[in-house]
Amino acid sequence: MVKNSSSSSGQPAQSVRHIMSLLEQKAPSATAEKWDNVGLLVGDPDWKTTGAVISIDLTAESITEAKRLGYRLIINHHPCIFPKGKGLSAVTSQSLSSRLVFEALQNGIAVISCHTNFDVCALEVVQTVSEGLGVKALGRLIDDPTGLLVKLVVFVPATHKEVVRDALMNAGAGHIGNYDSCSFTSSGEGTFRGDESTTPFLGKPGELEKVQEVRLETIFPKGLRKPIIQALEAAHPYDEVAYDLYSIDRAPGGKGLVSGLGYGFWGDLSEPKSFSEVSRSVRTLFQRDAFLITDPVPAQIRRIGFVAGKGASFVNAASAAGCDLFITGEAGYHTALEGSRRGMAVLELGHRESERFFLSTIKQWLMSAGYSTLELNVSTQKFSYPDASTLTACEHP
């Protein structure tokens, strides 16, 4: 069992729960897909650690590295227990599906998964990839647009309208397309009377109060409900906050880089480029010598879409956005062929290769939150395709 209370630099240990809370602020678990399995999957939230190994998958390499450094936490992109609700039937050292989980537990190492919640919330990846390709990102890719938005209506005393509105917008509300801070207000009279146990912000217990209030309306992606309501309750002056939530049937627009809504991005190069030019940027950015590309390869590319990991379900969305090239980890033969028939080439980097910026982004989140000396080790988990000569359709220089 690994036991440590401080790092070699004197950094005090933090609880796994504390780090989970930070990740929850950045990528709320409620934004994950229903089928996904995110959060703390192995270990005790009260275990303390001076650092974390960050890796795409739970591997023998990442466990060995955690043991070597004395860390009690591994943060993965892919869940080590999957699928949700149909996972492990037993955790033993002999089972191929569970022996890594067994080893982590045996060594007192917790494992956190940050998967589709990371994908829909980490706009840092959008920025890194779009800038690396020379693309101006214009919107997110959405595979199923129904039921993604919620309308919030809250009643606020006029004196606190701006404070509450700012808190909601800072928490992620109010995005419509390429516009942010979208809201509507109307004035009216609110009434209330608290019993003798209350300490009202306005008026006195037992007396009917009439107050000039504002009805404040805005929208947000449904997965951001928890942080939005937390921000509302923290900023609102009343001890009992009156608010309503409504499901919105209308689909969100594809435009706008909104956290919690959609995957990856689509956007435009400043001017059309040849495929050779774009492919050089792809190779440099993702550190790939080879990848798969559907025929026919476009002569000129202006609009590019990108989704990390398995992007098969976003081929139609990228095509609908008018992309000339869709870059993803894997799409599958028939799905990529369908994109080609629509006039859009599909470039497949490899699943894990496309997700490499998970590692640097998680590290950045922890460091920017004040963990200036928290020891972090990034496991790159090298993975290669076969030699280019064995690929049926390989990018040519």
Image (tube, helix red, strand yellow):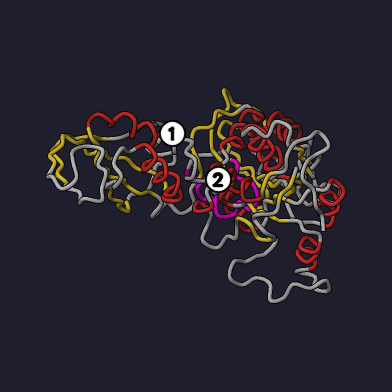
In the rendered structure, which amino acid carries the disc numbered 1? Answer: Asn
Q: Which mark is residue 27?
A: 2
Q: Is residue 113 left or right of residue 57?
A: left
Q: Secondary structure at mark 1?
A: helix
Mark 2, other Cα within 10 Å: few <14 / some 14–19 / many ≥20 = many
Residue 267 visible in the picture? yes
- Residue 244, percent from left and from top: 28, 50
Residue 176 visible in the picture? no
Mark 1, other Cα within 10 Å: few <14 / some 14–19 / many ≥20 = few
- Residue located beneath label 1 in the image: 170
Residue 188 vs 151, above or below: the answer is: above
In the rendered structure, which amino acid carries the disc numbered 2? Answer: Ala
Q: Secondary structure at mark 2?
A: loop
On-image quarter of the C terminus: top right
Going from the N terminus, do you reach mark 2 or mark 1 first?
2
Residue 336 vs 51, above or below: the answer is: below
Magenta span of residues: 306-320
In the rendered image, the residue lying farthest to the bottom is 89
Q: Is residue 91 left or right of residue 185?
A: right
Q: Residue at x 33, y 33 (%)?
A: 165
